[in-house]
Every structure is written in structure tokens, then in C-alpha cells.
Amino acid sequence: MQAADKKTRKQIVVGMSTCNIAAGSQDVFDLVQERVDAGLDADVKITGCFGMCFSEPQVQVIDEDGTTHLYSGVSKARIKKILDQHVEGGEPVDKWENHFAEGEDLALMGKQKRIVLRNCGVIDPESLDEYLAVDGYQALEKVLKEQTPEEVIATVTEAGLRGRGGAGFPTGLKWKFTHGYENDKKYVICNADEGDPGAFMDRATLESDPHAVLEGMAIGGFATGADEAYVYCRAEYPMAIERLNKAIADAEARNLLGENIMGTGFNFSIHVKEGAGAFVCGEETALLISIEGQRGMPRVRPPFPAESGLFGKPTTINNVETWANVPWIIRNGAEAYAANGTEKSKGTKVFALAGKIKHGGLVEVPMGITLDEVVHEIGGGTGTKREVKAVQMGGPSGGCVPRTLFDTHVDYDEVNKTGAIMGSGGMVVMDETTCMVDVARYFLTFTRAESCGKCTFCRVGTTRMLEILERICAGDGKPEDIPLLEDLAEQIKNTSLCGLGQTAPNPVLTTLRYFREEYEEHIHDKKCRAGKCRNLCKYEITEDCTGCTVCAINCPVDAITGAKKELHIIDPEVCISCGVCREVCNFESVKVI
């Protein structure tokens, strides 16, 4: 990696985000700290998530001359060798190091453009000094001392920044609306209620670079005339909440938030509100009601929050990623930001790659890149050695895009044409072992459970749709189920009050649109080609079997017999069609019949 500022001692930087810790970085950090305490000549510090979640834990060793070496997959055994050979011996352990100028590392990072993630995995998220060292709060100082609110709004508008929370509404226009309403009190809200299965962009950003979000909110407050703000963050993100609270306290202590910021007369305070995990509270009006202490349920719009929001006052709501873009835009200018992306979708977008993807984690790419580039070149394709079948975009509110449409460019309008939505940025990759009917059933299970129940068609309609999908997956589907699903879907979309109900049928509609034959096979042929629906599939071991015994060892009901290095056989009377044998087979010798 590139050389940083010159250091007088080696630095050992351990990734300590939630994902790193889940992979074992706490043990690595403790061992490093023990060695430093015992006299190892180095400084130890922490950082957040670099985005390469598939290869965590990650450790950086920064030499005395500032050269940074990033090590991946660092276990306790590996860190001992890194400390001995590199930190003490001065010789990097090349085989565990990432080389971003060659091979898969180049494919992974070469097409990314990091604006939101610019400091993630680079600075200590708990250190205000490190954020200041990378030009932190310079954008806030610039707008407070050199610009008017109207000029700030104009810059954000010219940059073409659109809300990254799902709908893609122009950020500058939203700010202009709030700015235009006269009132004695206004609010700014950061929507960090990230509830989509497979999405973790907001969590990683808040854990890794909380000050960028706070600075963006303060700039938004100045532009719209607000003096108070809330970060609505789900309580399931304890590390994000802890680091947010520390960042707020540190910024207030330096007069970067609070009263009379930087002596300019501008007051801006930020509070953290913990959400209880209701998915519907990601909808802006339900979120506002939740902050007010009531049950989170959407309300009729208009009036929109820009006119009558929190406690009836004009309110600006944007999500984590949107706020994190703002300081960069102010520092670098609207033109620099608009130089990335497409005509109607400027800038970059952060995606969380999950599912059956080789390089799972966070990526930030310029708008306009194709889905194929994201999934295959950056994501590395599947980690299962099977072909990619589809990608689910937009979470429960989105849809499934088939591999045949992977030439689709990633921008709001092009993705919408597929029937999916950009959403907040979750991207779940599926391979040929994924049953698309089962996928639709899974997402309907989620949205039905998360419906607040206010709208009859959302409350009852999603229940009826789920019952039909469960019946199809169980092998009891009827030919009339498909048109009934389509009819219910349209009724729910057209009669629901908020975005949850309006988009809940999307996974069903897109799977029917692109994978209708799978529904028909389930209903007419009583077959699940993916081997997921147990009542509709059986398994058979082919002549390609090498007799490695892995399938027999992993079978939970001992349905597989056969001698080592000889063809194995599945007893159909004992087999429960769980599919474990197919998953563990390294030779693709197990097929669905």
C-alpha cells in the first residue's frame, strides 16, 4: 500500500469492528497488546471495517518510514509470526499481505471509488484527533465561516447527491424545502434504522467513521436552519451507538458541536435515539413517531416532514450514507462529486455484498458500473464454485435480478426498470442451489411479520400471499395460485399507506417475472429444481462420486452408505431431503432428481 506520514515507531493497527471481532480480532488485539506491554517496540491502535469482511481479522503494520502493510485472515498463530518476523525482524510476511496492484486484490479495489468509506479501516474511529488529521470538520468550518445556507444547498444540489436510503430523492431539494419553511424550531434526523436482511452499510460506517456522519448532519443543520438533531439507530448495533456517543461527546468538548460552534454563533446538538428493531420504523414518518415516544406507525403524507416532522416542526431526514457524503462534497466541490456516476445518478454507492459471494463485505463503486462488474469482478463470483443465478437488491422492498440482466447499470432508473430497487444497498447473491419460490416466501415472511398492521391490505394481504407461497413450497400448489398472487400483489401495492406495504410484493413479482417456470414446476411437476423444498425433491449420488465419505459423515440421519473410495448410495427411505450432502460435496456428485 501507499506510504503514509513518516512514523518514528512501528504501528500495529487491529481491525476492531463488529465483523472483525466476530472473526476473532479481539484475541488478536489482546495478544498484540500483551507483547507491547512486555516490551515490543511498537504502538498498538484500533481501526474500523475496511470492507473486506471475507478476509477478516485484518491487521495493518505501519513501518517507521510510513509504508503500510495490510494482513488478512490474521489468526493468533499468524499474528505471532507477523510480530516476530515483521515487527521485530523487519521482514514482511508476504504470503498473508494484500497487494492492491495485482491479482484478485487489484480486481477487488481497482474499480472502487471510496468517498463514504474514505476513512473506514484507515483511522481510529474513537479518536477525534485522527479524524481531524484527515481534514475532519474542515467542511463544517468552511460553511460556518465562508458560506450562506443557500450556498450550501446550491452546492449539494449541483453535486447531484440523491438520498441513499432507498427512494433516491434529491438531497439538495429536500434541504431547500425545509430551509424554506419559517419556524422557531427545526430538526435534522439521521436514519440509521438499517433493517434489511443482508445490509450492514450503516453499521460499518457508524462504527468506522462516526464523525463524518456527525459533521454532515451539522452542515445540514446549518443549511436548513435546524439546531437539534437525532441519530435513530437500532439497538442491535451496540458498538455503533457506543462510538457515536463518544464521538458526540468529544466533538462537543472541542466546540465542534453544541453551543456557539467555533465561535460562529451556530448552535447544533445531536442525540442518539435507540430503536427497538421494528423494520417499519425505517419509514420516515414511523421513525418520527417513534422518536416522539409513540408506537412507530406510518402516517398520511402530506404534510411531509420538511413541513411538519418531528414534534410538528420542519425536519430533514437522510440516512447514514447520505450524511457521510456531505463533508466530502463541501471540501472537494460539487463538480468533483458529479464527475462520478451517470447523468441522473451522481457519485458513488456503497453496497453490502452478502449471500453466496466470494468476496463478501462492503464495496463503494461509482454509479453506472454494471451489476456484472460488482458481482463477478469485485465480488469474485460465488464462493461455492457454482454459477450466479440472481442477485436480490433492495432487501424485502426490492426484487431479484436474474443473471441475464447483469449488464444493467447501477443507477436508480436502470435498476428500477428491472423491478428491483437500489434500496439502501443490500445485495444478496444467489447461486443455482437457490429456489426462487423459497426466496419469495422468505421475504414475505419477513415483511408480514414487520407490518405495523395499520393498512388492511398490507396486514391481511401479505398473510394471504405468504400462505399461498408456503403451500406451493410444500407441494400443494394449485394452477390458480399464480394469478392470485399477482392480483394480491397489485392490490397491496396500490392500497398500502407506506413503503413497506407498497413494496412488499416486489420479491414475488420479480421472481414471477424472471423465474415463472420454477413456480410452474412446483405446482404442475411437483419438483424443486434447486433442491430446497423438501417435499418436492430427492437426491442421488452420480457415478462421479470419488468415495471421499464427506457426504456420509455430514448426513444428519445416516442415509448414505458406501465404502471409502467407492460409489456411495442414498437410501430414499431414510433421506429427509435436507440437502447437506449436496452442499458439502466437493465434486458436484450429488444431484437433485
Image: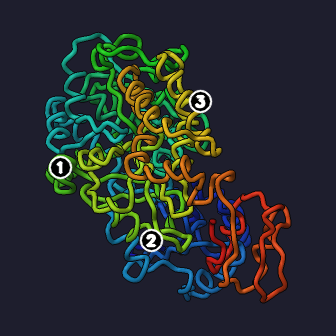
| Apparent side of residue 31 relative to residue 261 in the rendered image (left or right) | right
Which one is closest to the eye, mark 2 or mark 3?
Answer: 3
Q: Residues under labels 2 and 3: Cα distance?
A: 34 Å
Q: Which residue is mark 1?
A: 333
Tag 1: amino acid: Gly
Which one is in front, 63 or 294?
Answer: 294
Residue 274 in view of the camera = no
Q: Residues under labels 1 and 3: Cα distance?
A: 44 Å
Q: Which residue is mark 3?
A: 449
Label 2 environment density (alpha carbons within 10 Å; few <14, some 14–19, many ≥20): some
| Apparent side of residue 436 relative to residue 541 in the rendered image (left or right) | left
Label 1 environment density (alpha carbons within 10 Å; few <14, some 14–19, many ≥20): some
Q: Which quadrant, please, contains the C terminus?
A: bottom right
- Residue 380's tag is 2
Image x and y of residue 127, in percent? 50, 50
Which one is in front, 358 or 64?
Answer: 358
Image x and y of residue 358, in percent? 51, 68
- Residue 179's tag is none
Label 3 environment density (alpha carbons within 10 Å; few <14, some 14–19, many ≥20): some
Label 1, secondary structure: give it: loop
Image x and y of residue 399, in percent? 41, 45
Tag 2: amino acid: Gly
Residue 325 in view of the camera = yes
| Apparent side of residue 541 relative to residue 207 in the rendered image (left or right) | right
In the image, residue 508 sits, relative to residue 579, either above or below, namely above
